[in-house]
Image: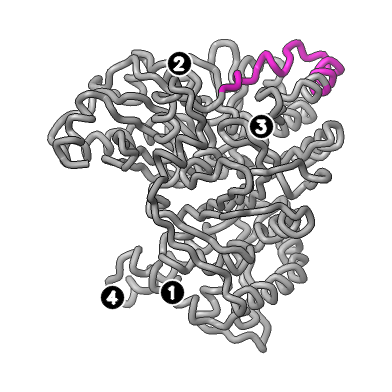
Amino acid sequence: MTTTEAQTAIEQARTALGIELGSTRIKAVLIGEDHAPLASGSHEWENRYENGIWTYPLQEVWSGLQNAFQALRAEVQARYGIPLRTVGAMGFSAMMHGYLAFDAAGDLLVPFRTWRNTITGPAAAELTERFQFNIPQRWSIAHLYQAILNDEPHVPHIHRLTTLAGYVHWKLTGQNVLGIGEASGMFPIDSARNDYDNRMMSAFDALLAQRGIAWTLRDILPAVRLAGEPAGTLTEAGARLLDPSGELQAGIPLCPPEGDAGTGMVATNSVAPRTGNVSAGTSVFAMIVLEQPLSKVYPEIDLVTTPTGKPVAMVHSNNCTSDLNAWVALFQEFAQVMGIEISESKLYETLYRLALTGEADAGGLLAYNYVSGEHITHIEAGRPLFVRTPESRFTLANFMRTHLFASLGALKLGMDILLQQEGAQLDRIFGHGGFFKTPEVGQRMMAAALGVPVSVLSTAGEGGAWGMALLAAYRQQRAQGESLEAYLTGRVFAGQNALTVAPDPADVAGFAAFMERYKRGLAIEQTAGEALK
């Protein structure tokens, strides 16, 4: 698209805007009719650990959204010389799960509890047994039931329970709805009906009645919407929330809000059976669209859906690159102390590429990247650790390779169940997220872990915000009756090239050797959490 064509598209609102609230960054991406990004803006933020809870203050949600949108608008003005006053459609996504409970007046009852919290073990275990369906600790229903088990005084006053994406959408449109993929991380979905599972809802409502709680689950959960369905429009109050300058116009149609899992599927064209993707950043999760149900319930595997309601097996690890990033920051501090000027991006690329020169098994070194607890390995309290024996080969290359391997350790344990025990089939798996930013390195590590080729698209760097913009664009085209799968394959990804890295046998063997150490050493991590409160 030429500059003139882009200007015309922006002025005539032949565009779509996607904004995603990730764990460390809020990103906005504006796309044109060819689905290519026209401009972007972002805002860095970070969760807090307060009173035993991982949280984000809601005022930071809005200041971050405003900053990201302002940065996007400034780029539009600088690049195309015109103001951004409206778009054709827009949508919001965010990190999934968590707990945002509001009373009838719309006031937050307790601080936002994010997906990162591992404080719902008893609730998750009881609901999994009762439903015969895996309920992970980070799911909204687990947080709700744990609050009930704890006799928390706010519970009787709950009028609305939602996720971060649902909260933003509600404040901007007045509509209490969720896309089905995001809803599937709140409560189990019946894919035959594309709605919450009635049997499980009735079972939960029976628990509420036993405790004398007046509301039912359907009273407080958002309504479920499929990709492409209407989900309200931007109100005047919503426009001012997003853009206090007053330039953004109300009336923009919104698509259903989705989670980062759903936008990852869309951004990698992984919404059809036998396709999969893996998102690796602060956390890491891999998703495979299933052809048939799993043979039994696995606590390591979540069952969610695509944005159109197809069942998806998801392996989610709470921890991925946070500890690795901390080590890189330490090396950057050392460089500064030594008077060496090096950019952060150059440092990351140098250290990541150095890992490729390390020994296949990382020289006998071991690390655990658990900044928070890890449900796959049943570790309740995270304590980042680096461990070696006197015989380990302690080199910088092996050190970096170890931390890249450790970022995928928990994921590997879950994926072995899915690929080996259940025999789930994959035609392709796409990678996206910060772990893949340095070309080839993240792909080689992931291919070694999963034993399958890993592809990265040229658009992978745009991430979930771009995926959300595609869902907003699909909302505009849905009237034509085209399925999301056909829309993505035929219009968005047709002709796109992907860089694919196949598993190297030496890397696969080396990762397997590392994993044997990893499994044996979990007792060290468990003890660290108990000893260092």
Image coordinates of residue 146 in percent, x first then y, are 75, 32
- Front tag of 3 and 1: 1
State the residue position of label 4. Answer: 339
State the residue position of label 1. Answer: 353
Residue density around tag 4, few if under 14, some if 14–19, many if 20 or more, within 10 Å: few
Observer-nearest of 181 and 245: 181
Q: In the picture shown, does residue 229 fall above or below 78? A: above
Q: Kindly report the distance in space between the C-alpha atoms of the residues bearing marks 3 and 4.
A: 48 Å
Q: Kindly report the distance in space between the C-alpha atoms of the residues bearing marks 3 and 1.
A: 39 Å
Mark sitting earlier along the chain (3/4)? 3
Mark sitting earlier along the chain (3/2)? 3
- Front tag of 2 and 4: 2
- Front tag of 1 and 4: 1
**Residue 204 in magenta?**
yes
Whether label 1 touches label 4, CB < 8 Å: no
Whether label 3 touches label 4, CB < 8 Å: no
Residue at image position (43%, 62%) is 499
State the residue position of label 3. Answer: 140
User: Amino acid type of disc 1?
Assistant: Arg
Image coordinates of residue 432 in percent, x first then y, are 48, 53
Q: In the picture shown, does residue 34 fall above or below 198? A: below
Q: In the picture shown, does residue 143 fall above or below 346? A: above
Q: At numbered mark 1, what does the secondary structure look like: helix, strand or loop?
A: helix
Residue density around tag 3, few if under 14, some if 14–19, many if 20 or more, within 10 Å: many
User: Amino acid type of disc 3?
Assistant: Ser
Q: Kindly report the distance in space between the C-alpha atoms of the residues bearing marks 2 and 1.
A: 47 Å
Question: What is the number of the mark on residue 91?
Answer: none
Residue at image position (50%, 21%) is 229
Residue at image position (35%, 32%) is 17
Image coordinates of residue 151 in percent, x first then y, are 77, 25
